Amino acid sequence: MSGLWNNLCVTEWQRLSLRGSEPVEEVLFDGIPGHLVAPLEAWWATWLNDEAAATVALKLRFTLQSSTGAKHWLRQLCIVNDETYLDVLDGLLSTGQPWHFAGRLALQDLLTQAGSVWAVSADFSSLQKRVAPELTSLVSEIVSGEGSAAQHLTRAWSELYGRSPDPSKACAEAIKAMEAAAAPVISPENLKATLGTINADIRAKPSKFQTVLGDGNAAGSIEPVLALMDAAWKAQVDRHAGINPTVPVSAEQAQMIVSAAVIVVHWFALGSVTVVEDGA
């Protein structure tokens, strides 16, 4: 019913017959694989109602003859097309309908146990491509906080790993997340600071800033932080239009930029980057 995604992940659980050997690299499944069909049918029957089904049908521009029986009608539409099924699940998660939060948790567990390439997002509002659990955990920690940086990082993650990925938007939101995190420390008086001006401020007086990445006897240099932010800034090649055709950011570039943003925002949130008052 679906193809296999060509990315690999190391699973924590192994079949009994394979335990004691090297960890198994499990291929993740895209679409709705056969072994996920029946569990999803049970989930659908338990957690979905006509009101939520009608709402998501409206969002997806599906024409319903009547809201009565919308749940059954939507199910029939989904079982013949994997992409429609995933779009509907994504749409259900995005609705403001107060359908059981436990249902979102149950869907998350189903996708994980089935080895799906898709996972429920950290804020339970969409489907996103599954990535390394360590990075996902860090992103979840960051976006659970408040502030502009967390909001921009949430949008960047959704634009990169959501059902309709847009690398350029992901990159733009990641840059904004770094700007929101770094500006209060690096350029607090510049209300129009960009990542470019923030990087310039660091270069103008690098000794004014320090990190916790020292050797025990002295504070660490700001250079590792600058290197990540500068690389991200220079890689956003479609930031402005010009005489020559704009070259769009690739998915691979966006992945690195968003990953850099996760690290940078986390470092500033931890207070790992500080100002040295007597910096020369």
Image: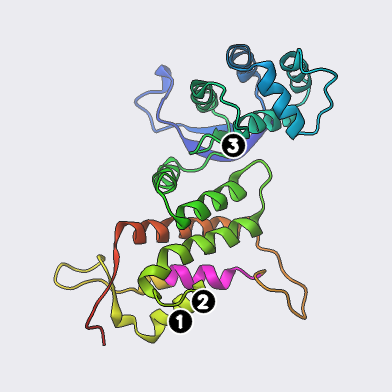
Disc 3 and disc 1: Cα gap in Å? 37 Å
Quarter of the rendering containing residue 161: top right
Q: Which residue is mark 1?
A: 200
How far apart, in angstroms, are the residues tagged by discs 3 and 2?
A: 32 Å
- At x 47%, y 59%, the residue is 261
Residue at numbered disc 3: 126
Please indicate whether residue 160 sits to the left or right of residue 198 in the image: right
Q: Which residues are magenta?
A: 227-237
Count of numbered circles on the image:
3
Q: Are marks 1 and 2 in contact (CB under 8 Å)?
A: yes
**Amino acid at the residue labelled 3:** Ser
Closer-to-camera residue (57/28)? 57
Q: Name which residue lies at 25% across and 71% down.
A: 220
Separation of marks 1 and 2 at Cα, in angstroms: 6 Å
Secondary element type, mark 1: helix
Residue designated by label 2: 196
| Residue 112: image location, x then y, percent | 50, 28
Q: Is residue 242 located in the magenta-colored stretch of the structure?
A: no
